[in-house]
Amino acid sequence: MVLQPSMNSSDNSQAAPRDLRVVAIGGVADSVPPGGGLDPAPQRLVTSDTAPLSLVSGFFTGPWSAGPVLLPEGRSQFALLDVGNAVLVVGGMYAGAAANAAETVAAIVTGDSLGAFAGPVGTQISAQMCGIQPAGTLVEPSGVAWREVDGTARGLVLGGIDLATRQRRSCVWGF
């Protein structure tokens, strides 16, 4: 389950529930057009926010508070995949996005704690194909993660916008 909160005037952040709390990551510190736009100028956030969560009801049991710096650089408009012992950030707008410097970064999960994101990890989506076209640098992709019956964690990244061509992608990439 991934939540998409809007707090502290941040937009385009992502959040992951971790046992007894939710961790919201990244976003934009300014007002942006719907969807966040493709302008590299707004300040992207490296910070996180946390809030306590009830495992029974799924409701918040307290207010949001500042969390640790988790991202290596400010990032927004990315897909967040909780794949069990790691959380992946895929695509998005960040300083190196045009060069695919760190398209996918990962953080280790220990209990309900999330470590700092580092990378890049895995094969770059930008190097893969979307039909007969290169996938490109993905901004605003959607992501979903789940567990198979045997406990194997899986994730999919769906669509997005190729930052270089400004064209929408309608492909799916698996993790």
Image (spheres, rainbow, N blue to C red):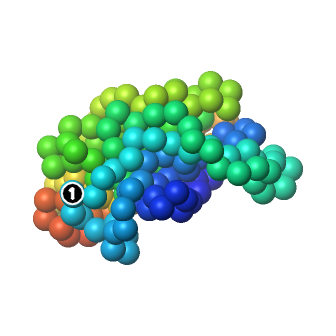
Q: Is residue 157 visible?
A: no
Name the residue nearer the viewer: 50 or 109.
50
Closer to the camera in the image, 27 or 9: 9
Q: Secondary structure at mark 1?
A: loop
Res 42 seen here: yes
Work out whether 96 lies above or below 8. above
Q: Amino acid at mark 1?
A: Pro
- Percent x, y for residue 19? 73, 38
Residue at x 52%, y 57% (from the top left corner): 8
Image point (34%, 44%), residue name: 74
Rendered residue at 40%/36% (across/down) = 71
Q: Position of residue 168 (x, y in %)?
A: 26, 69
Residue at the image position 28 percent from the left and 58 percent from the top: 42
Front residue of 174 and 46: 46
Q: Within 10 Å of the Cα at label 1, are there few (<14), some (14-19), or many (20+) other Cα atoms?
A: few
Residue 165: x and y in percent read: 13, 65
| Residue hosting label 1 | 40
